[in-house]
Image: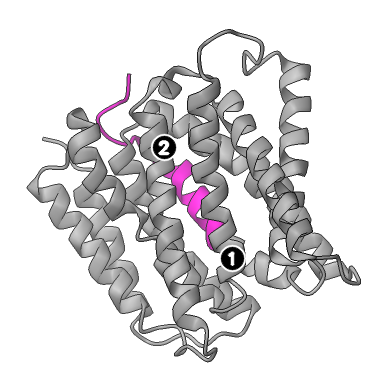
Amino acid sequence: MSKRSLDVPAIAMLVLLCASWGAQQVSVKIALPAFPPLLQMGIRSAGAGLLLLVYCVLTGRGKLLARDGSLWLGIFSALLFAGEFVLIYVGLQWTDASRTSLFLYTAPFFVALGATWLLPAERLRWPQWMGLFLSFCGTAIVMGVPRAATSPYALWGDLMMIAAAMLWAATTLAIKASSLATVAPEKVLLYHHGVSAIVGLGAAAVAGESMGAVAFAPAMAMAYQTVWIAAITFLLWLRLLAAYPASTLQAGTSMSPLFGVAFAALILREPIGPLFLLAVALVVAGLVLVNHRR
């Protein structure tokens, strides 16, 4: 059963995840010269799935052979997961890494709305909605931090990120509001990576994508995505999701755009403005309210 609010270990874990995911869009951009988007997605998921399978076999975790009736629900949530990353990897060709972070992390609003009907025990009360609104204001301010769109296809890239945010929210709700909530997180993640690998590699073959010359930086970016992001942080996220309210957890991911903008400025030299600190203050204040329970 989910706890009603986040405790200190959960908050610390969420900060770590948000910092990691904030750098994810930057790593995708770095890897693009050698790994085209769909191929990059397929390789990452295949590699992470293999690592996770080895981990389950060696530790006995995941209950992979248990007949728990999770197959079709697992495939459904995996299709949502795969669709999200198709949109992210393709859209990143057309929009900046910092803009990607901002639009992708509108997901908390979609989760909060969906939870109103699908997760009545986790409905946000008005102080928590106010907190979500404050975080939104912080995100809106941060939207002025990245540079203006420079690509003629930037609008399409931004729309893809918003659609990806909706699919991320749908994946969260599909897990939390169904029997998947009681299935081992390792098994759920194996569904996700298995389907995502098939979709990514298949779409890459259809699109005629092929690897370019692999330099050190793209190789390290792919290793970071595969081992740390896809295999480790996604598993940690599913474990948190099994123990804490979906709306509160997803609201916590509003920290990721802040890390995304910071990493984009630090690594990709994308400009950052003076309102960034105000945005940080608003997001943090909003999250305190969202996590507050009477």
The question of residue 209 being in magenta is answered with: no
Closest to the observer, 61 or 10: 61
Specify the quadrant that holds the N terminus: top left
Amino acid on which disc 2 is placed: Ala
The answer to which image quadrant residue 263 occupies is bottom right
Q: Is residue 101 left or right of residue 221?
A: left
State the image coordinates of residue 114 (x, y, percent, origin top left). 25, 43
State the image coordinates of residue 294 (x, y, percent, origin top left). 10, 35
- Where is 96 relative to 175, above or below? below
Closest to the observer, 185 or 74: 74
The question of residue 16 being in magenta is answered with: yes
Residue 117 visible, this angle? yes
Residue at 59% from the left image edge and 43% from the top image edge: 233
In the image, the segment drawn in magenta is: 1-22
Kindly indicate whether the residue at mark 2 contacts the one at mark 1 (C-beta within 8 angstroms): no
Q: Which residue is mark 2?
A: 10
Residue depth check, mark 1 versus mark 2: number of the one nearer the observer: 1
Q: Is residue 112 left or right of residue 216?
A: left
**Res 25 label:** 1
The answer to which image quadrant residue 231 occupies is top right
Q: Is residue 153 left or right of residue 129?
A: right
Helix, strand or loop for disc 2: helix
Helix, strand or loop for disc 1: helix
Amino acid on which disc 1 is placed: Gln
Outermost left residue:
126
Total tally of numbered discs in the picture: 2
